[in-house]
Image (cartoon, rainbow, N blue to C red):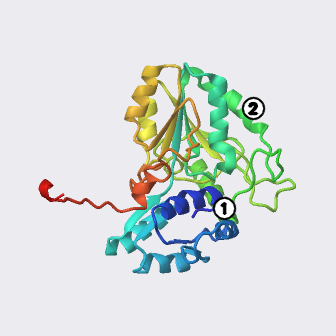
């Protein structure tokens, strides 16, 4: 279970697994260990039978490794990094265990020249910076038509500067989950600058009253090549890259030029453009005139390429993940009935 959405992650994995009649063992992230304990206690108080759900704590390299090697485990559902997902696939795959992996994303949000600019700006800010960018479905690549690029950039920078960072209810987003997460982002930003990127907003740890926390400024880059490292790497933080394109085909080329294929969004008033985009972008979830994130419980969620193994979580499709099919043929004589 991931650290960024410990309540939703619990619900997405545990509830459909229980509905399908499974015995469930949940290992939450070591960075958010307590949430799962609280929900498990609530389920116990509600009458969930003893032994049906277990919550175990520990580091992924220790407890997680033990679980994926245990021969009693028939199915593994994991949300997290590509590297860990590959390790699970290689280890548990040797005994042909069913594996559902929901991994990373480097999601694109396209702003066409006919877009509702205010709506597109709101979606961009929320997609890139809500939850401090700690979403697998965050919008980290913002692709804008050249005819509106400068106007869009100016308005985006103005909105970004107004964002409030902290732990108050009135703040827009909070800290990163750990010092290692913060340091990773800083290192990639330094690398991006050596490759020619220009940081036009943020790019630093906060140096005010939050300087001792894991806080990063909302960061926007431009002059980044689609082939640069930062264009291909999920940072899991409040970092967005601006790309300028001439037309929809160029926008699609950049959208699909990624090792990931989780979500994408397009802002346009053209039904034709929206239809072409949703057909040709290689992702599992498409939003038209919305955010790159925002999956709903009744809708399937999952991605292509390095974003997952093809199984879907949430929606009725999740029941396929946590159950097994059995085909039965019965041959009988109607006279015997």
Pick whichever, 182 or 263, lies toward us.
263
Q: Which mark is residue 166?
A: none
Q: Is residue 186 above or below residue 146?
A: below
- Residue at position x 82%, y 58% from top? 211
The secondary structure type at the circle numbered 1 is: helix
- Residue at position x 45%, y 37% from top? 254
The secondary structure type at the circle numbered 2 is: helix
The percent position of residue 311, horizontal first and vertical second, equals 40, 55
Image quarter of the N terminus: bottom right
Quarter of the view holding residue 179: bottom right
Image quarter of the C terminus: bottom left
- Residue at position x 64%, y 27% from top? 119
As drawn, is 22 to the left or to the right of 172? left
Is disc 1 surrounded by few (<14), some (14 to 19) or many (20+) residues within 10 Å?
some
Query: What whole-number distance in Å separates the C-alpha atoms at marks 1 and 2?
Result: 26 Å
Is disc 2 surrounded by few (<14), some (14 to 19) or many (20+) residues within 10 Å?
few
The percent position of residue 35, horizontal first and vertical second, equals 69, 65
Q: Which mark is residue 158?
A: 2
Q: Which badge, 1 or 2, is on the more N-terminal residue?
A: 2
Quarter of the view holding residue 170: top right
- Residue at position x 66%, y 61% from top? 183
- From this viewpoint, is residue 144 visible? yes
Q: Is residue 29 above or below residue 333?
A: below
Q: Which mark is residue 183?
A: 1
């Amino acid at each position: 279970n991931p650290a960024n959405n410990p309540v939703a992650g619990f619900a997405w994995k545990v509830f459909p697994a229980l509905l399908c009649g499974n015995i469930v063992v949940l290992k939450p992230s070591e960075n958010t260990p307590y949430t799962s304990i609280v929900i498990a206690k609530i389920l116990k108080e509600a009458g969930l039978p003893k032994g049906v759900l277990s919550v175990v704590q520990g580091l992924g390299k220790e407890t997680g490794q033990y679980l994926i090697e245990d021969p009693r485990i028939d199915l593994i559902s994991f949300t997290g990094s590509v590297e860990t997902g590959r390790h699970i696939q290689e280890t548990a795959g040797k005994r042909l265990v069913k594996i559902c992996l929901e991994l990373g994303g480097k999601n694109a949000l396209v702003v066409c020249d006919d877009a509702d600019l205010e709506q597109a700006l709101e979606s961009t800010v929320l997609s890139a910076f809500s939850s401090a960018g700690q979403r697998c479905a965050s919008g980290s690549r913002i692709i804008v038509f050249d005819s509106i690029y400068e106007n869009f950039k100016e308005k985006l920078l103005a909105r970004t500067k107004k964002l409030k960072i902290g732990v108050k209810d009135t703040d827009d987003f909070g800290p990163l989950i750990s010092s290692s997460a913060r340091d990773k982002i800083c290192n990639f930003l330094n690398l991006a600058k050596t490759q020619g990127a220009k940081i036009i907003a943020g790019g630093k740890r906060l140096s005010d009253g939050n300087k001792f926390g894991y806080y990063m400024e909302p960061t926007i880059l431009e002059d980044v090549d689609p082939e640069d490292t930062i264009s291909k790497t999920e940072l899991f933080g409040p970092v967005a890259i601006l790309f300028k394109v001439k037309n929809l085909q160029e926008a699609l080329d950049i959208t699909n030029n990624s090792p990931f294929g989780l979500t994408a969004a397009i802002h346009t008033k053209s039904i034709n453009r929206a239809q072409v985009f949703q057909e040709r972008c290689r992702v599992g979830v498409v939003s038209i005139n919305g955010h790159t994130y925002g999956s709903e419980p009744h809708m399937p969620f999952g991605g292509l390429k390095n974003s997952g193994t093809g199984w879907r979580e949430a929606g009725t499709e999740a029941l396929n993940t946590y159950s097994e099919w059995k085909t039965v043929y019965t041959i009988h004589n109607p006279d015997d009935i």
